[in-house]
Image (cartoon, rainbow, N blue to C red):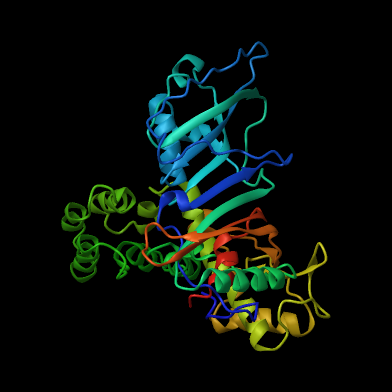
Amino acid sequence: MNEGIYSTPTLGIKGRIKQRIADFKVKEIDEEGKICDITLNEKNLSEFLPLIVPENPEKKDYLILSMEKFNLDLNEAIKRVARFNYLSHKRISYAGMKDKRAITSQKISFYGPEPERIMQFKSRFVRLREPEWSNKKIEIGDLKGNIFEIIIRDIELSEIETKKRMSDCIAEMNGGIANYFGEQRFGGVRQITHLVGKEFVKGNFEQAVMLYLTGTSEREEAQVTIARENLKNSGNFSRAVKEFPVKYRYERAILNYLIKKPEDFIGAFRVLPKALRYLFVHAYQAFLFNKVINERIKAGIGIKAIEGDVLIEGFPSAPLYGFETGFASGKAGEIEKKVLEGEGFSLKQFYVKNMKEMSSKGARKKIILIPKNLKLLDVEKDEFNEGKLTAAVSFELNKGDYATTVLRELMKNE
């Protein structure tokens, strides 16, 4: 999504991330600067820690909890909590998404739970802690940022060379790097989320839904690839729902709808959670944002502020395109317009008449990312990859910034 363009001239250490779940830890920082700590690890998953919910004499509506999860996506973790309490998952809200293949911690708010029931909650991969009552629920964006603690594995360099390259790159990164959206914004294994979003913006609802169902990847298991290809070739929804594994619940939900109403692709997509539907157009906006950064770099402008830039907190920005987007002026504005025109789009198309929840007014985002407290913690032998090394790093990012963007500069694998 960023064409192998880097912000630092240093050599990378290569290696790989997320080989093990515990290699990637994310701690949420709330708006007041309080860190949501992690207590979960591979050895204590089966431990049940008693949860004592305090009295609520003022009859406050929301119970605020610290939620830790191990190798689960956020929606699944929330469903487990809601299901145990016999309540809708819509009663649970959060400030931001967190990685799946990781150990993560964050604050959630739960509207009107039964204290006696929630105190009995037990799940192998979800832990609830630090309950407190509040009159205010947690909304998307109600966080300052996240702290990351990450182990990079499978490094083929010597310890001395690893430390040197890391030190050199960290020194360069303290001046800021391109604030690319990370690959998880584009859909993980298949990397098609932005392409689906593009079809929605174009108003091609059938193409969007079918791309979501049939887009394949070499990294996906063979059974699923076959199911997707069979559906693409046959268009047989009844056959497809039998071929998709049970764990592919979103695909199966769409297919079950299409079996009943084969022409209603808008209705079919609406079986997905609203928060998930938003991600597709947001992914397309992110794709275009990354493209603007790349075009600036190719034009020799880079990520430093130039005349005509729209500044946010003193830093240049690029558009997250929408129907109310305002362009920069000068050379920066020319690039912003060129990227959109190159896609064959106009701003007004981001108002999706027949599916208004996929519409976007647009916004702007800083194109410079400056990681805070970026440190190399240790370089050690890799016990899971013979003859290789690991490098442990930690850093803090503001909300909306991606750890994989920082790691990409350190590793330079592309």
Res 346 quadrant in image: bottom right
Please state the horizontal and vertical placement of residue 108, each as a whole percent of the image.
56, 35
* Percent of width and height locating residue 145: 66, 50
Work out whether 312 lies above or below 129.
below
Q: Quadrant of residue 27?
A: top right
The structure residue drawn at horizontal position 59% and vertical position 38%, both measured from the top left corner, is: 37
Which residue corresponds to the image point at 39% horizontal and 67% vertical from the top-left?
387
Residue 405 higher or lower than 392, as above or below: below
Left of 85 or right of it: where is 368?
right
User: Where residue 201 sits in the image (x, y, percent)?
Assistant: 50, 67
Q: Quadrant of residue 84?
A: top left
State the residue lying farthest toward the bottom: 299
Residue 116 horizontal side relative to residue 34, left or right: left
* Residue lying at 66% horizontally and 83% vertically, measured from the top left: 297
Residue 210 in the image: above or below residue 139: below
Q: Residue sitting at 63 percent across and 59 percent down? A: 401
| Viewer-closest of 49 and 309 | 49
Front one among 219 and 253: 219
The answer to whether residue 253 is seen in the rendering is yes
The percent position of residue 53, horizontal first and vertical second, equals 56, 18
Residue 289, visible in the rendered structure: no
Relative to residue 13, is residue 48 drawn left or right? Answer: left
Q: Nearer the viewer, residue 35 or 43?
A: 43
